[in-house]
Image: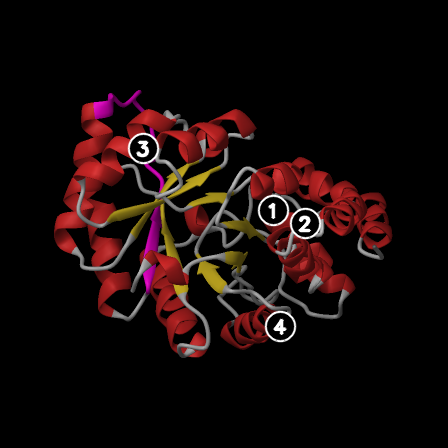
Amino acid sequence: MSNKEFSGIIAYSITPFFRKNDQVNVDVMFEVIDDLISSGANAIAGLGSAGECAYLNDDEWQLVARQTINHVADRVPVIIGISELTTKKAVERAVYANKHGANAIMVSPFSYYKLTEDEIFDHYQAISDAIDIPIMIYNNPATCGVDMSPAFMLSMIENIEHAEMIKESSGDIQRMHTIQQQSKGTVPFFNGCNYIALDALNAGATGWCTVAPSLIGELPKQLFNAVSTDEQQQAETLFSNQLPLLQFIVKEGLASTAKAGLAIRDIDAGDARLPLKPLTSDKKAELELLMTV
């Protein structure tokens, strides 16, 4: 699939659990996916941070990946997140996603030991050699412990066959300007930091990866559309209205906040897995107010 088909709102899908036994609740997962597509999401991203990818065993990870792809059923593209300590495991999961029909994978190297650029390059190269779908290079230093420079990510785009897109989540808007300038606008890049969404889109971001549609429906897509049609005043108003919620999501955590927000909307996705804790009653009340934007 061409990377041109990835643009707009890339909506994170969560992984729901039954409260009685902590198993994956596939039916609620389908409900959430349908809701995201109805909100105008241009693609579904399964098994990202909001999907609690780090808290799933192998069978659960494969179940969520497979069922996400099957249920979306080509209504929009599907991107599957992969963040693993070892190259072997990352390759295994990339091959699984490719085999079951993912349109792309989103790969962030996860670090225990500090990785060199050569090690990171070889990690992506091994994944690329094993698949035939696009790779989104995902820079998420706060979560994964690896911080890749724009120049290095662009060098991987140039030299690794299936590396085609970048997701930048450091929160540094200057990096997005750098990607746009150094690539001369030829490399699609995506914003992964909610509270700079407007600046990122104005800097040329191809899209915005966010869990916000699960909480506020079509508003993120409206923001993207306003920027795309150069309705700057409307875009600023839309962003200003959403900003307190976007900041709350980042501060309180994607998975716990998304599940609390879905509960407010009468969708029971269970709680995030321990050691993550659910929002307190005070935080849930605050979230409910913020969702009335």
For marks 3 and 1, give the one nearer the viewer: 3
Residue 161: image location, x then y, percent: 17, 47
Q: Mark 1 points at which residue?
A: 254
Task: Give, as a single range, the part of the protein colored magenta.
Answer: 103-117
Three-letter amino acid code at the position of disc 1: Leu
Disc 3 to disc 1, C-alpha distance: 25 Å
Three-letter amino acid code at the position of disc 4: Asp
| Secondary structure of residue under mark 1 | helix
Disc 3 to disc 4, C-alpha distance: 33 Å
Looking at the picture, tell me which residue is in the foreground, 217 or 257. Answer: 217
Classify residue 174 as left or right of residue 258.
left
| Secondary structure of residue under mark 4 | helix
Classify residue 230 as left or right of residue 206.
right
Mark 4 touches mark 2? (CB < 8 Å) = no
Disc 3 to disc 2, C-alpha distance: 30 Å
Mark 3 touches mark 4? (CB < 8 Å) = no
Residue 238 seen by the camera: yes
Q: Mark 3 points at which residue?
A: 153
Residue at the (21%, 59%) spot, across then down: 95
Q: Mark 2 points at which residue?
A: 257
Q: Mark 4 points at which residue?
A: 35
